[in-house]
Image (tube, rainbow, N blue to C red):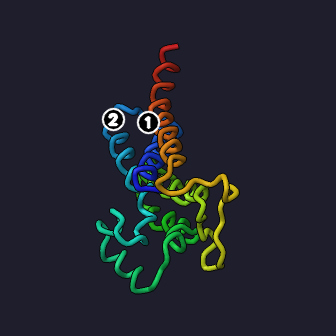
């Protein structure tokens, strides 16, 4: 999936955390969480040369390149998710869960991709949730439709909260 799709998935993830933690969308904490969600949603692509995260986190990206880490392997694995959960422990609850859920959104939606994800790294073999003929190819019309659906959901979550509070 493309960065913009992962960003929107991270945004939706942050909104879900905001609702779960009962944080007003009209607060500085919410603004920080939404930004963190968008960034966390793209973070796993630090292993992909040329990606925005690879440029922003160049030392880490360069190290992964030297170690010959392939795309959608270690950074998309349950192991790294567990490490992020441990490393993020000192963060306030809202930002902890936003980072974790936003990061998890990345390998989760990549499981819909035709190439799959090495979720159980270092165990070889990639996993995908859909049969290859139904899977979403990166940059395809299917991905554009999926991203649009995520965007509609991202608009719908706060709208549903407003409707709920006034009813």
Residue 125 location, quadrant: bottom right
Q: Residues within 10 Å of mark 2 (few under 14, many from 20)?
A: few
Instruction: Name the residue rendered at 35%, 42% in the picture.
Output: 29
Residue 2 location, quadrant: bottom left
Q: Nearer the viewer, residue 131 or 22?
A: 131
Say the numbered circle drawn on residue 4: none
Residue 137 location, quadrant: bottom right
Helix, strand or loop for disc 2: loop
In the image, farthest residue toward the right: 131
Say the numbered circle drawn on residue 27: 2
Instruction: Name the residue rendered at 57%, 71% in the picture.
Output: 79
Residue 98 drawn above or below residue 152:
below
In the image, farthest residue toward the top: 167
Q: Which residue is mark 1?
A: 23
- Image coordinates of residue 86 in percent, x first then y, are 50, 67
- Image coordinates of residue 84 in percent, x first then y, are 48, 66
- Image coordinates of residue 10 in percent, x first then y, are 45, 49
Residue 167 drawn above or below residue 70:
above
Q: Are marks 2 and 1 in contact (CB under 8 Å)?
A: yes
Instruction: Name the residue rendered at 43%, 65% in the picture.
Output: 45
Q: Residues within 10 Å of mark 1 (few under 14, many from 20)?
A: some
Measured Cα–Cα span from mark 2 to mark 1: 8 Å
Instruction: Name the residue rendered at 38%, 44% in the picture.
Output: 34
Helix, strand or loop for disc 1: loop
161 displayed left or right of 120? left
């Amino acid at each position: 999936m493309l960065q913009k799709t992962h960003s929107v998935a991270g945004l939706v993830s942050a909104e879900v955390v905001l609702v779960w933690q009962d944080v007003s969308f009209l607060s500085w904490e919410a603004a920080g969480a939404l930004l963190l969600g968008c960034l966390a949603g793209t973070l796993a692509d630090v292993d992909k040369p040329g990606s925005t995260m690879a440029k922003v986190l160049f030392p880490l990206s360069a190290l992964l390149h030297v170690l010959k880490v392939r795309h959608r392997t270690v950074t998309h694995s349950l192991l790294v998710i567990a490490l992020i959960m441990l490393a993020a422990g000192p963060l306030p609850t809202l930002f902890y869960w936003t980072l974790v859920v936003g990061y998890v959104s990345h390998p989760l939606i990549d499981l819909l991709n035709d190439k799959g994800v090495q979720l159980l790294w270092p165990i070889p073999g990639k996993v995908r949730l859909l049969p290859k003929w139904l899977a979403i190819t990166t940059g395809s019309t299917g991905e554009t439709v999926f991203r649009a659906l995520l965007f509609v959901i991202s608009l719908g979550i706060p709208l549903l909260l407003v409707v709920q509070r006034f009813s």
